[in-house]
Amino acid sequence: MSITETAPLTAADYAAVVDEFFARYRAQDVRGMAELCTVNADFSYPPFEMWGKQRVLRGDGKVGTVGRAIWTGLIQAFPDLTNVVHRIEANDDGDAAVQVDIAGTQQSAWGAVQPAGKHFSEPHLFLFHLNEEGLITSLTAYWNNAGISQQLGHLEVD
Amino acid sequence: MSPTDTVSSFLRAVGARDVESALRTVDPNVRVNFYGLGVSGTGVATLRPVLADTARAFPDLLLTVRRLMGLGSSVIAELTIEGTQADTYAGAINQEKHLDLNEAWRFEVDDGRIKAIDAYWCQQQLYRRLGVKRFDQIAIV
């Protein structure tokens, strides 16, 4: 019996995975994005808050439930949703950070923002952790919703 | 001193509202982007008012570092900023509202000095916490 050892993944390997994640996002391949993540991968979009009369919906949970639903909803509201990756940085421990602009033209309602056919492009910072198999185990993103709302012509804070 | 150590020193000083100590960890030609505030530029003269305004408006400022991610010469800090507004901030008049906001700051560090800061947070959340109703009427309650 022999045991085959594979070389541990490097920062470059992890960077390649997150680069592929944004390629699939550009292709609007939500299923493919999720396939780069572990089944139970954590998902957190801290700026994502939808305030209702009784409760606040937050963008925290799992990629397979909350993440996929948000990505799918975004693509429905912004059918030309795309991204421009500016910088990918990673380390050998499986951490990665991506500075990326997310952009799109609104065709249907997104939260309280009614469609006016306007375009947005907003800088985002995505943070990832990947396991030794190169799968994403957690994903967090930060951005400024005020910038997006104003570009879409929505001037109400809520 | 590692890049992470430099960033930790900077953030400790910011949390202590000690702007001048924070600036001592920063290169004079630092490049800054505070996307939520719409502030970008180079030099300490661009950074100082951002830090000073925060220190002035939130005298009980509490800065909690939730995660530091070292990526070679870059460092990512995930922060929570908390405090009670006591003065005008980012155009919002003081209604003594409590602020709690999760943020992420990316730093570039070289030779023990911070060369670049890109700070990401949601200004819509910030205004919501401070009681602002409209982006075009920030100073109106």
Image (tube, coloured by chain):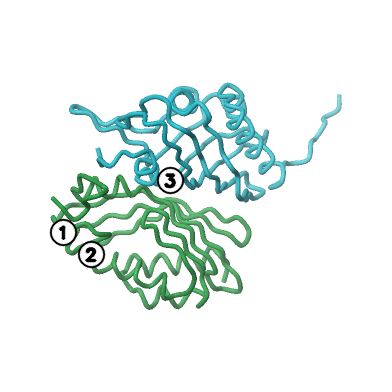
Chain colours: A cyan, B green
For the point 66% across and 35% down, the residue is: A20
Disc 2 element: helix
Q: Could you tell which of marks 1 and 2 lies nearer the N-terminus? A: 2
Q: Amino acid at mark 2?
A: Ala
Label 1: chain letter: B
Instruction: List the residue tagged with mark 3.
Output: A143
Give x and y (percent) for residue B110.
60, 70
Label 2: how many residues lie within 10 Å, few (<14), some (14-19) or many (20+)? some
Marks 1 and 3 share the same chain? no
Give x and y (percent) for residue B117.
49, 62
Label 1: how many residues lie within 10 Å, few (<14), some (14-19) or many (20+)? some
Instruction: Using the image as rendered, state which of residue B17 and residue A116 is in the foreground.
Output: A116
Instruction: Using the image as rendered, state which of residue A74 and residue B25 is in the foreground.
Output: A74
Instruction: List the residue tagged with mark 1.
Output: B94
Label 2: chain letter: B
Give x and y (percent) for residue A66.
43, 26
Q: Amino acid at mark 1?
A: Asn
Instruction: List the residue tagged with mark 2.
Output: B57
- In the orientation shown, which residue stands out farthest toward the right? A1
Label 3: chain letter: A
